[in-house]
Image: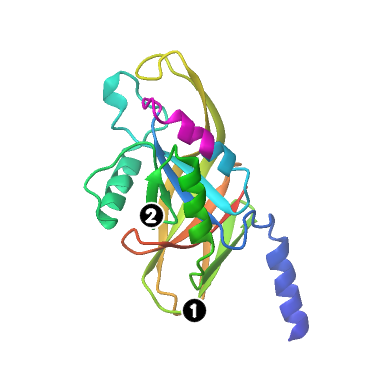
Amino acid sequence: MSRLFAALTGIWMAAASVVMAGDNPVVVELYTSQGCSSCPPADEILHKLAKRDDVIPLALHVDYWDYIGWKDSFADPAYTKRQHAYARALGERSVYTPQMIIAGSDHVIGAKAMDVTDKIRIYGAQPTGVSVQMVRSGDNVIIKGTAQSRQKMVVHLVRYSPSNRVAIRRGENAGRTLDYTNVVTEWKTVAKWDGRDALSLTQKASGSEPVVVIIQREGLGPVMAAAQLK
């Protein structure tokens, strides 16, 4: 039996890449827009966060600034919808850019670096009782998770483009060439999980873009666990 266990463990470890994240990485969602003059400082903060292994920073570009003359090339109405859903979940009446959602639990003006850092420190120190691991296996990713208690959760699979440069010709940022980091290109919910049994999923994830798995309490609640493969 021990030989079989060792063999299976070897297969799991050799499936491919090692998870590139800290033990309890904090997911930071930046809601931003190419058409927002207040957003470039927040975009720069996200770039700096991407260099840390205790944070998974993700840029979700919204479309409600498109009306002022420049259509954001990364914007997706689904991200606008997600931001509005967060507002309802957090008891807020409106949304804004740049807004950072920290660990699915709190929000802060994305251009205020110290506030962002403080929130990351607070939520990074809070155990959730949920853990997740992920490895590649060819064009797939294998996701495994455990939870210490039962609760309603959803599993998200996210892809992002690490680095992009955009020359903006119109709108509030007209004439500027701006760099964007970790721009989300796909966000899909792949499973529901109640934590009673261990989580085990295999999902298609072809291509070279990094992959993120996020386990979040149902109803846009706190992020319970996350991991990424770069």
Q: Tell me if residue 147 can be seen.
A: yes
Task: List the residue tagged with mark 2.
Answer: 106
Residue situated in front as seen by the camera: 21 or 101: 101
Q: How is the image coloured?
A: rainbow
At horizontal 52% and vertical 33% (from top left) the residue drawn is 44
In the image, what residue type sits under mark 1? Gln
Q: Residue furthest right?
A: 3
From the viewer's side, name the closer residue of 170 and 208: 170
The residue labelled by disc 1 is 148
Q: Is residue 44 magenta?
A: yes
- The disc at residue 121 is none
Hey, which quadrant is residue 172 in on the image? top left
Q: Is residue 58 above or below residue 102?
A: above
Residue drawn at (48%, 70%), measured in percent from left and top? Answer: 128
From what the image shows, is residue 180 above or below residue 120? above
The segment highlighted magenta reads 34-45
Q: Nearer the viewer, residue 51 or 228?
A: 51
Q: At 39% from the left edge and 46% from the top edge, which residue is drawn?
A: 108
